[in-house]
């Protein structure tokens, strides 16, 4: 069942109510009799099942070797190797 958030126009009280989808929205605040407005809140979700964490999607042997490699590599990233120079038209083709 979803949790709905309401705000009273009269007393400015904000509260939550657990309601079914089929229930009608509340219109009157039971404490002060003011008009209620249903607020739009961001939805909450939970990750369930495997594959959400690094350790869930790998086998135990590869997770151990990857974590060991990550812990030993603490320096800056290595520079990429220089690309070989393009061949010029004056060079002879390689023999078959």
Image (cartoon, grey):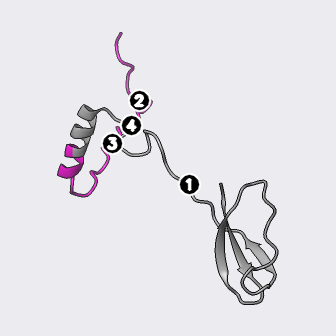
Horizontal side, residue 71 vs residue 28: left or right: left
Q: Are marks 4 and 3 in contact (CB under 8 Å)?
A: yes
Q: Is residue 19 above or below residue 66?
A: below
In terms of image quadrants, where is residue 96?
Answer: top left
Residue under the image location 66 percent in, 58 percent down: 2
Q: Is residue 81 magenta?
A: yes
Mark 1 secondary-structure assignment? loop
Circle 4 residue = 57
Dominant SS type (magenta): loop
Residue 89 as seen in the image, left or right of residue 59: right
Q: Residue at x 51, y 52 (%)?
A: 46
- Earlier along the polypeptide chain: callout 2 or callout 3? 3
Q: Which mark is residue 45?
A: 1
Q: Residues within 10 Å of mark 4 (few under 14, many from 20)?
A: few
Q: Is residue 31 magenta?
A: no
- Residue 92 position in % (x across, y down): 38, 22
Pointer 1 or 4: first along the chain:
1
Stretch of the chain drawn in magenta: 68-96
Q: Position of residue 31 (x, y in %)?
A: 72, 84
Using the numbered discs, state the Cα–Cα distance from disc 3 to disc 1 in whole angstroms: 21 Å
Crowding at dot 2, Cα within 10 Å, few <14 / some 14-19 / many 20+, comes out as: few
Quadrant in the picture for the N terminus: bottom right
Q: Give the labeled residue for mark 2.
A: 90
Report helix, strand or loop for mark 4: loop
Q: Circle 3 is placed at which residue position?
A: 55
On residue 60, the disc is: none
Tag 2 secondary structure: loop
List x then y, in percent, for residue 65: 22, 38
């Amino acid at each position: 069942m979803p949790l709905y958030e309401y705000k009273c126009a009269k007393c400015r009280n904000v509260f939550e109510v657990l309601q079914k989808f089929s229930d009608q929205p509340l219109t009157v605040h039971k404490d002060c009799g003011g008009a209620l407005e249903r607020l739009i809140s961001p939805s909450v979700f939970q990750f369930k099942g495997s594959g959400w964490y690094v350790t869930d999607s790998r086998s135990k042997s590869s997770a151990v070797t990857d974590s060991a490699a990550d812990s030993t590599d603490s320096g800056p990233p290595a520079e990429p190797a220089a690309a070989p120079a393009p061949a010029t038209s004056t060079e002879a083709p390689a023999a078959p």
